[in-house]
Amino acid sequence: MKKLIFLVFCLYLGGVIMSSALDKVEENIFKLRSNDIVNNEIMPMTFTYKGYGCDGENKSPQLSWVNAPSNTQSFAIICHDPDAPRENGWYHWLVVNIPKNVSSIKRGEKIDFALETLTDFGTVGYGGACPPVGHGKHRYNFTVYALNTEKLDVSANSKPLEVEALVKKYAIAKSTITALFER
């Protein structure tokens, strides 16, 4: 009986220590947050496209991130719809060369000293959700990347796949929030 009580006590103590260690790890994970979009929920109309039959406000959502790795030199944001009926999905927003001291972006804001590049709309800057009518729910993955380089060698006219390839080449951490939308 004493051995059983001792074993239960050890399991309890191990669980407490393990839980505490996991809490510490969770505190230090690079994490993207938003006051405007909720992970795996429908995106509000404010953040949908204005055009192509969509009547949104075409504003980028508020985003903030915490616990970037200590060797982070810059950040990048990519919003991508993998469900678009195209081979590579649809790129809605690409922002690179975000200074390492920036950890948030307000709704509809442009980041000083950062560079927005071409989207699949053929324009520079944020282009909101606007999936084809009747195509079902699409996922809009807003991903912030911590990069180990201060600047990527791209221009505003760089193609989305080229920008994404460079971002991924220098990425040391990433975090994603996925918004949903259909029409």
Image (cartoon, grey):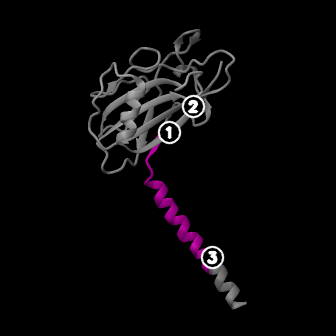
Q: Quadrant of the N terminus?
A: bottom right
Q: Which kind of residue does numbered mark 1 sit on?
A: Thr
Task: Please provide percent x and percent y for residue 115.
Answer: 31, 25
What residue is drawn where x is 30% and y is 28%?
A: 114
Can residue 76 be seen at all in this image of the molecule? no
Secondary structure beneath disc 3?
A: helix
Labelled pair 2, 3 in contact (Cβ < 8 Å) = no
What residue is drawn where x is 27% and y is 34%?
A: 151
In the image, residue 70 above or below residue 39: below
Alpha-carbon span between mark 3 and mark 1 = 35 Å
Q: Which mark is residue 11?
A: 3
Alpha-carbon span between mark 2 and mark 3 = 40 Å
* The furthest residue to the right: 1
User: Would you call the spot at circle 2 few (<14 residues within 10 Å), some (14-19), or many (20 or more)?
Assistant: many
Magenta residues (range): 10-33
User: Would you call the spot at circle 1 few (<14 residues within 10 Å), some (14-19), or many (20 or more)?
Assistant: some
Q: Which kind of residue does numbered mark 3 sit on?
A: Leu
Q: Which mark is residue 179?
A: 2
Mark whose residue sits in front, 3 or 1: 1
Magenta run includes residue 16: yes
Labelled pair 3, 1 in contact (Cβ < 8 Å) = no
**Predominant secondary structure, magenta span:** helix
